[in-house]
Image (cartoon, helix red, strand yellow):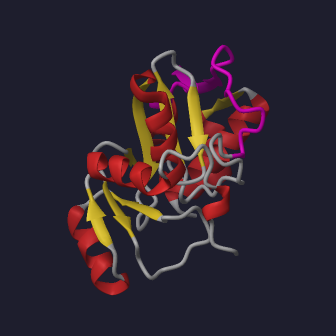
Amino acid sequence: MRPYDRQEKIRRFIEQHKKLSIEKLSEQFQVSKMTIYRDIHPLVKEGLIVRKSGIISLVTDNPSPSSNIHECVYCHKPINPRLLYRLVLSNNKIETTCCAHCGLLRHHQLGEAVSHALCHDFLLGTTVSAFSVWYVMDTTLNIPCCQPQVLTFEEQNNAENFVQGFGGEIYTFQDAFETVYQRMHGREACANHMDNP
């Protein structure tokens, strides 16, 4: 099982059970406790969970603003764990979008209310800061999601290699932030700009 798959399962488990032990998670996934600690690190940084004495607990006073935690707060599509984008707000609330496209548009809406943002490296599945990744748009690879499709890469050389194989343009966070907004002309939803599955 890849790290981001395991992390999403841990997320669902903690939302369901409210409290879990590192040891039980280690046994459940048949990985070391150190691996579990690495998996939960982004969840702790997001403010979703707290860790104390080998136990992780759901932060109950930090509810998701969306009534459905598996639905994009921007376009209301189901969330694909591989593409999701999280906005950590200055009031410690967290919003999740289905992809970087919606994440950047929602970030534009919220402005300075966003204190941090997280996304997944498209190739490796690792959780990384959205402010430091490389954004690729206009590739020939068609993933059914919002358009213009935006993929994220932690390493610039991985983004460049991807573009060599699948085409597209590489952007920094600020350039992607402005480009997606300009292409969408500030529209409030992107549901009508998705590829059909």
Position of residue 123 in the picture relative to residue 132 (left or right): right
Q: Residue furthest left?
A: 157
Task: Pick the quarter of the image with the C terminus.
Answer: bottom right
Q: Residue furthest bottom?
A: 165
Q: Nearer the viewer, residue 87 or 112?
A: 112
Placement of 151 over or under 68, stated as above or below = below
Q: Quadrant of residue 146?
A: bottom right
63 inside magenta stretch: yes
Residue 87 in percent (x, y) is at: 49, 35
195 inside magenta stretch: no
Residue 114 in percent (x, y) is at: 43, 27
Residue drawn where x is 43% and y is 42% of the image = 118
Q: How many marks?
A: 0
Residue drawn where x is 43% and y is 57% of the image = 183
Residue drawn where x is 48% and y is 64% of the image = 148
Q: Which SS does the magenta portion mostly show?
A: loop
Placement of 148 over or under 64, stated as above or below = below
Examine the rendering and report whether any part of residue 27 can be seen.
Answer: no
Residue 85 in percent (x, y) is at: 51, 47
**Magenta stretch in the rendered image:** 45-71
Placement of 171 over or under 42, stated as above or below = below
Residue drawn where x is 66% and y is 53% of the image = 79
Q: Residue furthest front?
A: 185
Q: Nearer the viewer, residue 142 or 32?
A: 142
Residue 30 in percent (x, y) is at: 60, 55
Examine the rendering and report whether any part of residue 133 can be seen.
Answer: yes
Q: Quadrant of residue 90?
A: top left
Position of residue 85 in the picture relative to residue 10 (left or right): left
Task: Pick the quarter of the image with the N terminus.
Answer: bottom right
